[in-house]
Amino acid sequence: MPEEHLGQRTDVFVTSFCQFPGTEPLEIHEVVRGELGEPNLAVLPQLVDRGVGADAVGRSATLLADLGFDLQPHGWRVGVNDGIDARRARSILRSDENLLADVLGPEQKPAQRIKLSVLGPWSLVASVYLSNGERSISDHGARRDIIAAYAHGVREHVARLARATTLRSFTVQLDESLIGDVLDGTIKTSSGYRTLRSIPRSEVRSAYQEFLKVLTDESSNLSVQPVVNLPTADERWIERIDLLNQAGITAMIVDPHGLNHRKWERIAGFVEGAGQIFLQVLTPKLPAPGVVDAVHSILRPWHQLGLSDAQLGSLTLMPRGDFSSCSSSEAVDTLQKLQTYAQALEQTRVDA
């Protein structure tokens, strides 16, 4: 496989979002291992249909190192003793970690790569509450402590998976759907009658720098690549990407449906700076274009921006959206089509 080292690849391959339907993770692992094994990038499945504790906020709150949490009518609350819902969330996460080890154990070729998905640190802070019922993002000390605890907790999650398996390379998807609201001051108070003050760009950037420093610590001989997932349709998307790039983010998920020429130019600059692009190119359950049309739709803007075929190794292909409302057969069909697109692009890159 073309690569410089375990954490840096130069080939075009396929991955997906981590959300799948149903309540039986073993069935989903069969799909994932069958369709996203090497040379592609498999994922740790998340099944939100399992209910409370399997949701994005509850699952991410589970990763707050040394911080208890519980579920209240207004949402997840942190800095308290664990409630029954918190214990359930922790049980689901540990069960998923143990099941992954059981699934990977019998494989003849030891697996070394996987992609995980968690909320981005600022989206998590914007989603949880303090013990007094107010949003945690309203308190400077609380948001600092929560992001620090979260960084260590996500890192511990990675370390547990590494100890239990042969995995050594981790891609951590950070879903930051609320970072624009954090920066723009559009997060509502718990009462809903007013909005909270915007968080300064300098604070958002420095907190991200510290978060990434902990997450990507190389002392344990593990490779961890954060990839940020922002709403591409955000009018100020370029500003958000610039800020996160300054903080150390070098990989991002992109939906071309939300791109204008300026955004494409920013992507080109990202690629020129050795950044990685996770490109969403196929919507599950919708008719799929043929290989020639699909590849052409990717290469056309690529070439218009002056990027070369040799730089296609910056691309990873993903579905446009997750599989949470798909059947297993629909997920398999989507991933197989994506693989044919990736193989064609990889051949184009090799021939360059």
Image (cartoon, rainbow, N blue to C red):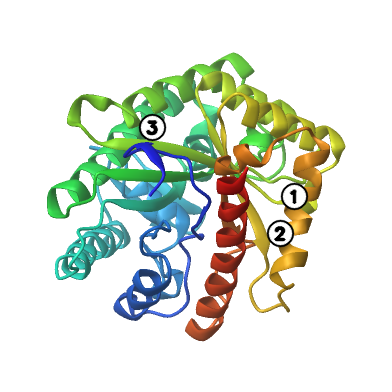
In the structure shown, which secondary structural element does the residue marked by tag 1 occupy? helix
Q: Amino acid at mark 2?
A: Val
* Structural crowding at the residue carrying mark 3, measured as other residues with C-alpha within 10 Å and reported as few (<14), some (14–19) or many (≥20): many
Q: Position of residue 194 (x, y in %)?
A: 72, 37
Residue 153, numbered label: none
Question: In the displayed image of the protein, which residue is found farthest to the top?
Answer: 202
Picture residue at 75% right of the left edge, 42% below the top:
302
Residue topped by disc 2: 295
In the structure shown, which secondary structural element does the residue marked by tag 2 occupy? helix
- State yes or no: discs 2 and 1 in contact (Cβ < 8 Å): yes
Residue topped by disc 3: 146
Vertical arrangement, residue 206 with respect to residue 282, above or below:
above
Picture residue at 13% right of the left edge, 48% below the top:
163
Picture residue at 37% right of the left edge, 74% below the top:
34
The quarter of the picture where residue 104 lies is: bottom left
Q: Quadrant of the C terminus?
A: top right
Picture residue at 74% right of the left edge, 49% below the top:
299
Q: Position of residue 279 (x, y in %)?
A: 63, 51
Q: Earlier in the sequence, mark 3 or mark 2?
A: 3
Q: Amino acid at mark 3?
A: Ile
In the structure shown, which secondary structural element does the residue marked by tag 3 occupy? helix
Q: Position of residue 8 (x, y in %)?
A: 40, 36
Residue 234 visible in the current orientation: no
Is residue 308 toward the left or the right of residue 17 in the image?
right
The quarter of the picture where residue 43 lies is: bottom left
Pick the front one: 83 or 265: 265
Cα separation between marks 1 and 3: 42 Å
Residue topped by disc 1: 299
Q: Amino acid at mark 1?
A: Leu
Is residue 287 toward the left or the right of residue 276 in the image?
right
